[in-house]
Image (tube, rainbow, N blue to C red):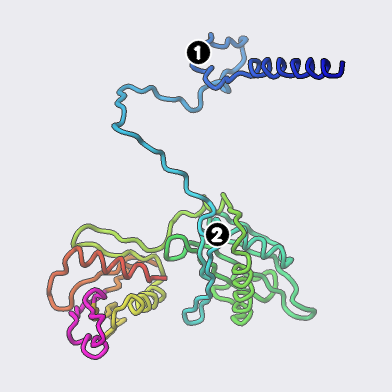
């Protein structure tokens, strides 16, 4: 009796499963058989503005299938470089800023978390300009108040960000100064924030608003055609000059002379492929290798904008292929 009951139960469940499969059929292609319905008629006096097509899909007039197969590219990941960030504190004269890997859209929420955990209240949040301004806060009883301003922007290289800090101490009625009123406090804030960002590099959150507000992708671009190729650098001139000199050294150029008054570096360079890797290279290699000499000009063209022009020192015309290779090499070391 029990066996018959179990058998009937199995049969009933099987029938239910089969009927369920037929009841929940695949409807993903039903739109192909859809028919146009008549236009909706509204009563007299009722506006049809809300029923208008906001995004009209244009018809296809000339249709030609693409030859072969085509694979659509995958969308760019918002969390690119997360988990591999490098954080540094950069310095030029009295200016300090934080340089780290990652787009501003990745760094923005981590800076917000830092301020929140520090108990610092925000007064201004500007996603378009990448600016966070804090409210005035008491340091200690009897001491002047202080507030911070953090400006987040793209770094020189694509995929990097810079955080510029401003510390003001005084009274609430004072406007923001051009430079921090307490440089030591600014350096202290930079160290604490940089350490937090280094420790929180595995956080993969991304600010869509900050990502949309970032209008540029890096601050250095290679432009021009053929023999007129050059680098365009979006930095204040003093920082651009210092960054260029550092990049030339790192790129393997030897700076023979420099003249900031005329915006030029005179260089010598040995292509790594021309160097002899044998055991005599350390003693004789520098004499046998082909040494080329160049002049690099950092030419200001607008406020906060310069171009880097590369040529031979003595009238020889630099081949476009050689210029392209060397400009890309310099570009790779600019920060």
**Residue range highlighted in magenta:** 271-296
Direction right: furthest residue: 1
- Which residue has dot 1 on it? 33
Direction bottom: furthest residue: 283
Badge number at residue 334: none
Q: Secondary structure at mark 2?
A: loop
Question: Could one spot residue 267 in this view of the protein?
Answer: no
Residue drawn at 31 percent across, 78 percent down: 252
Near-viewer residue (105 or 23): 23
Q: Residues within 10 Å of mark 1 (few under 14, many from 20)?
A: few
Near-viewer residue (191 or 329): 329
Residue drawn at 38 percent across, 70 percent down: 334
- Which residue has dot 2 on it? 82
Q: Residues under labels 1 and 2: Cα distance?
A: 46 Å
**Number of on-image labels:** 2
Q: Are marks 1 and 2 in contact (CB under 8 Å)?
A: no
């Amino acid at each position: 009796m029990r066996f018959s009951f179990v058998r009937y139960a199995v049969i009933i469940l099987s029938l239910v499963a089969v009927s369920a499969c037929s009841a929940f059929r695949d409807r993903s292609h039903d739109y192909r058989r859809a028919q146009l319905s008549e236009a909706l008629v509204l009563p007299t006096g009722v506006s049809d503005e809300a029923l208008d097509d906001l995004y009209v899909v244009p018809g296809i007039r000339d249709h030609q299938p693409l030859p072969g197969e085509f694979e659509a590219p995958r969308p760019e990941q918002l969390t690119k470089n997360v988990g591999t960030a490098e954080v540094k504190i950069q310095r030029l004269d009295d200016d300090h800023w934080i340089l780290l890997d990652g787009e501003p859209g990745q760094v923005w929420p981590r800076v917000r978390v830092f301020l929140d955990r520090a108990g610092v209240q925000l007064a201004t949040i500007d996603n378009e300009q990448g600016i966070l301004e804090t409210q005035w806060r008491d340091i200690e009883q009897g001491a002047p108040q202080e507030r911070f301003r953090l400006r987040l922007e793209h770094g020189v290289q694509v995929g990097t960000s810079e955080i510029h800090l401003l510390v003001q101490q005084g009274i609430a009625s004072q406007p923001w100064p051009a430079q921090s009123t307490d440089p030591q406090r600014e350096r202290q804030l930079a160290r604490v924030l940089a350490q937090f960002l280094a420790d929180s590099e595995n956080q993969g959150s991304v600010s869509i608003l900050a990502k949309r507000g970032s209008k540029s992708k890096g601050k250095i671009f290679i432009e021009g055609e053929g023999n007129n190729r050059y680098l365009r650098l979006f930095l204040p001139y003093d920082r651009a000059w210092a960054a260029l000199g550092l990049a030339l050294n790192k790129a393997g150029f030897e700076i023979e002379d420099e003249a900031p008054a005329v915006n030029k570096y005179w260089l010598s360079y040995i292509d790594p492929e021309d160097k002899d890797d044998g055991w005599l290279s350390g003693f004789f290699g520098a004499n046998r290798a082909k040494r080329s000499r160049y002049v690099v000009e950092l030419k200001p063209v607008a406020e906060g904008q310069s171009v880097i022009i590369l040529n031979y020192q003595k009238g020889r015309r630099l081949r476009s292929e050689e210029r392209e290779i060397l400009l890309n090499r310099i570009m790779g070391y600019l920060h």
